[in-house]
C-alpha cells in the first residue's frame, strides 16, 4: 500500500516496508502498538500482518488481517 503526500510517495511508507522486509523483529512491537492506537488504519494492520508472516507467525498474520477486517466493518 502506497501512502501519498503532496502527490509523491511517502518516504515513511517506503521506510516502513523496508524495515518489515529486513528487520521484522524490530518492526513488530512498533506496529503492534500502532495497531492498538489506530485500530481503523488499514495500512498498519497490513504491515503488522506482513511482519508476522515474515517472522514465521502465520497464525498471528491471519488473526491480524481478520481483526483488521472486523474493525473496518464496524
Image: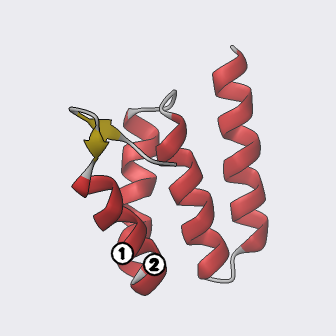
Residue 59 screen position, x and y as percent = 78, 66
Residue at position x 68%, y 83% in the image:
56
Residue contact between numbered discs 2 and 1, judged by CB atoms under 8 Å: yes
Report the Cα–Cα distance between label 2 and label 1. 6 Å
Residue at position x 70%, y 62% in the image:
61
Residue 52 screen position, x and y as percent = 61, 70
Q: Relative to residue 41, is residue 34 depicted above or below?
A: below
- The residue sitting at the front extreme is 7
Q: Secondary structure at mark 2?
A: helix
Residue at position x 37%, y 45% in the image:
34
Query: With 46 as the anchor, is 73 left or right in this view?
Result: right
Query: With 40 as the anchor, is 27 left or right in this view?
Result: left
Residue at position x 73%, y 28% in the image:
70
Q: Which residue is mark 1?
A: 19
Q: Nearer the viewer, mark 2 or mark 1?
A: 1
- The residue sitting at the top extreme is 74
Badge 2, how many Cα within 10 Å: few under 14, some, many 20+? many
Q: Which image quarter is the C terminus in? A: top right
Residue 43 or residue 66, whichever sits in front: 43
Q: Which residue is mark 2?
A: 24
Q: Relative to residue 10, is residue 21 depicted above or below?
A: below
Q: Secondary structure at mark 1?
A: helix
Amino acid at each position: 500500500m502506497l501512502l501519498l503526500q503532496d502527490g509523491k510517495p511517502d518516504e515513511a511508507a517506503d521506510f516502513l516496508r523496508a524495515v518489515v522486509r529486513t528487520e521484522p523483529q524490530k518492526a513488530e512491537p512498533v506496529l503492534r502498538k500502532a495497531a492498538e492506537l489506530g485500530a481503523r488504519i488499514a495500512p498498519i494492520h497490513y504491515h503488522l500482518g506482513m511482519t508476522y508472516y515474515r517472522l514465521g507467525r502465520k497464525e498471528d498474520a491471519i488473526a491480524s488481517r481478520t481483526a483488521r477486517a472486523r474493525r473496518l466493518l464496524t
